[in-house]
Image (tube, rainbow, N blue to C red):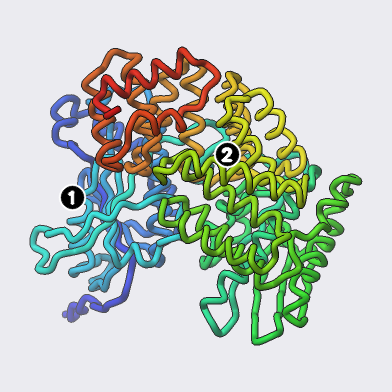
Amino acid sequence: MEQEQPVRVGRRLAAIVAADVAGYSRLMGLDEVGTARTLREHRKVTDALVAKHGGRLVKSTGDGVLLEFPSVVDAVECAVAVQAVMAERNQGIPEDQRMLFRIGINLGDILIEGDDILGDGVNVAARLEGIAEPGGICISSFAYDQVRGKVPVDFTDLGEQTLKNITRPVKAYACSIGAAIGSSSMSTLGNKLLQLPKKPSIAVLPFDNFSSDAEQGYFADGITEDIITTLSYISSLFVIARNSCFVYKGKARDLRKVGEELGVRYVLEGSVRRSADRIRVTAQLIDAMTGNHLWADRYDRPLKDVFDIQDELTKEIVSALRVVLTEGEEARVWQRSTNNVGAWGDAVRGFDYIWRGTAADIITARKYLTSAIAQDPMYAKAIAMLACTHYFDVRFAYTNAIEEAKRQLAELTDQALALDPNEPYAIVMKANVLVFEERFDEAIEVAKRATAISPNDALIWLALARDYISGGRPAEGEQAIRTGMRLNPFFPVNYLAVLGDALIHQGKNSEALDVLCELVRRNKNYISAHLHLAGLYSEAGELDKVRQEIAEVLRINPSYRVPMAKNFYLSSDAVRKEAFLDALRRGGLPT
């Protein structure tokens, strides 16, 4: 008689995903056969996504699944893709009949028994799934530490959670993904392929920091940003925005997948090693469709030559892609904002804090930019971005001294333009000054000049979209923001705010509601979304919902008042603006 072989037992670290259908028993009670069929159809799609992201189905239990991934990043990206495609599949279905998944993710040690996995790591994932919102994702702090800054979603800190049958509290984070907004947006979240532009298209991935000091990471980031900025001036190229390129920072990269997700043909990647007064930069340009190398080089120079290296890199890219520059582009591409490495380094740090956008970040950005300007008083871009910090103060009520902030914005903008009349961000700031002065038509023409100088800069298209909307041309505003979204496929939530505003001004209230609700799902503390929602609900006569949105505004900023909204809602349509402000008053916003 053959002796039965013992089941092999082992351990390993893994990313564990637990998922089930919220309210499955209720759905089965409504329509048993139909619910089972619908789940099977959904599973065909979601199982394909699991396989695409390298996951393994451990077991299926009715409406639930247990999955294992070798990488937490892959696990979260898969969960995001699943929730996005489910949001799409649920469109047009009554809310009480929608099939919504809850997903929990943990990184932990697992016990292996044959094909099954067991242990505390699995139990935590299952419990996190139980506290996830329908259509949402809940992850442990262990998983969050691995994916922070590496996936294009916003997480909300839920604090320490007491989970059933788990002896210790577990710190958790939540994110919620809705449907993809528009054909040009959230390409990877909606699992949609972006078509390649007709012109040569390129993404410049964050250069790796190979310096012994991790703090020098800003230096590698600065080189990456400068290359993106310079290429953005070239009209015969299509250049992906910094925000979307930096999604891949610190991640293992499948360049074919990167090209697919960003909708580009070519990818530039490289590394930077800084040591004392020397710098080594390597770079390679790759065809993402074939994987072939078009060009590669290494530069080992004194630190003071960092700007020369950037110029040579740009020339190599232009040559490899056979791009011909116009006369105006020739002048702009090779023009330097500064030759002072110290000023440049502080400005790079300042720019990074501006893109983060909170009130505290703007204060920190101002300190770095002030330092940069002290080192090089002729640094036009740094002065323009210092002006931008004051624009944030006015637009988002980060200060009580609004008139002083407007004065600083105007003076610094004029100073930057006097130094460089073609600095795109100074031009954008001038358009903002004109909007605050309610000179809307002039603002639009000024902003259009910025897009002509830097046609691949997604942020400039965002600014132009705002100006179109404020100036009573919302259809053109929608077109401009969608251009920005295509240049920045992993766009942050402020793009949704502008798109929602453009839709509202065109009377597309249903579409606007979807966009703004998606924004709130991604960031519940974004004040402008709640303000716009209050206006929409007021138009629909839903005063209770107006009050709820105003309550959210005051939760985020207890000091927010109606006069602050006047600097937020900038419109040439005085009747519409007054109706909006009246909605806020009726909703309970103090005057």
For disc 1, the marked residue is 130
Of residues 167 and 368, the one drawn nearer to the viewer in this rendering: 368
Q: Residue at x 81, y 57 (%)?
A: 335
Residue farthest toward the bottom in the current orientation of the protein:
276
* Looking at the image, residue 500 lies above or below residue 410: above
x and y, in percent, of residue 271 in the image = 65, 73
* Looking at the image, residue 571 lies above or below residue 253: above
Residue 420 located left or right of residue 508 = right
Q: Which amino acid type is marked by label 2?
A: Met
Q: Quadrant of the C terminus?
A: top left
Residue 200 visible from this viewpoint: no
Quarter residue 400 falls in: top left
Of residues 569 and 54, the one drawn nearer to the viewer in this rendering: 569
* Looking at the image, residue 515 lies above or below residue 303: above
Element class at badge 1: helix
x and y, in percent, of residue 585 in the image = 29, 22
For disc 2, the marked residue is 485
Q: Residue at x 41, y 65 (%)?
A: 71
